[in-house]
Amino acid sequence: MKKLSGKLNKYSIAVFISGKGSNLKSITKNSLKKKASYKVKLVLSNNKKAKGILYAKKQNIKNYTFDFTKSKKLGIKVLKILKRNNIKLVCLAGFMKILPEYFIKLFNGKIINIHPSLLPKYKGLNTHKRVINNNEKYTGCTVHYVNKSLDAGKIILQKKVRITKKDTIRSIKKKVIKIEHEIYPLAIEKVLINP
Ligand code: GRF
């Protein structure tokens, strides 16, 4: 996809969340910059209580809350919503459900995710705990394409942070989320402009 000019011609993206939505916030904030190539057209949460949904509402972003991973009928409904809204990219941001294979196939190559580790190391959950237990000197975050294997798709962007002896799970979480907010918007631009 080529660079779009003018504020009105931004690519539409969707953000899928399950919780706090701090990445959603940073992605949205960046989208409001003049030079941004994308706008957040819709937010979907599997969880009605997700804080991120309140943020989407405040920002007047179209939002949906239902767990479409439960049935193919609901999954197809979401694919239709994506099509209707001309969504070019789906960004998973703390979306805690595994996407069904048919969904990934039908929206092929246009789904990305952020993971709080330096992939391919520490796929899955509880990354910071495992990083500490293994006495790692560095950790970080990764934005990657989503394929049918968990946290294993092609890497788009990574950033690392140093771990010191004083660090705890909590302090590492804080360091990592900070760099997540930096790289996710950059990764989105990269995928849209220069895949
Ligand atoms: C982030 O650490 C992300 O890497 C992981 O879930 C967390 C979501 O945080 N997949 P938030 O909801 O964006 O604040």
Image: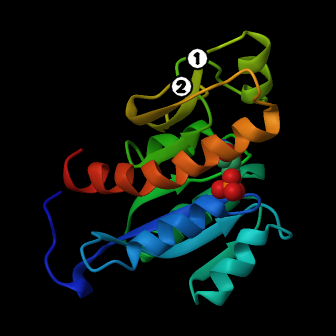
Asked if disc 2 and disc 1 are in contact, CB closer than 8 Å, the reply is yes
Q: How dense is the environment of label 2, judged by Cα within 10 Å: few (below 14), some, or many (20 and up)? A: many
Question: Is 88 above or below relative to 166?
Answer: below
Q: Nearer the viewer, residue 15 or 68?
A: 15
Disc 1 C-beta below 8 A from ligand 1: no
x and y percentages locating residue 24 in the rendered image: 58, 65
Q: How dense is the environment of label 1, judged by Cα within 10 Å: few (below 14), some, or many (20 and up)? A: few
Picture quadrant of residue 97: top right
Q: Amino acid at mark 1?
A: Lys
x and y percentages locating residue 171 in the rendered image: 75, 40
Q: Nearer the viewer, residue 81 or 49?
A: 49
Quadrant where the N terminus lies?
bottom left
Picture quadrant of residue 89: bottom left
> Quick check: can you spot residue 23?
yes
Q: Residue at x 21, y 55 (%)?
A: 193
Residue designated by label 1: 121
Q: Residue at x 60, y 53 (%)?
A: 93
Q: Is residue 88 left or right of residue 34?
A: right
Residue designated by label 2: 118
Q: Residue at x 48, y 74 (%)?
A: 29
x and y percentages locating residue 186 in the rendered image: 36, 53
The answer for how far apart the CA atoms under marks 2 and 1 are is 6 Å
Q: Residue at x 28, y 50 (%)?
A: 190
| Element carrying mark 2 | loop
Q: Nearer the viewer, residue 113 or 116?
A: 116
Q: Residue furthest top?
A: 134
Question: Is 21 above or below relative to 128?
Answer: below
Question: Is 67 above or below relative to 12?
Answer: above
Q: Amino acid at mark 2?
A: Leu
x and y percentages locating residue 36 in the rendered image: 29, 71
- For residue 94, which numbered disc appears in the image? none
Q: Nearer the viewer, residue 134 or 66?
A: 134
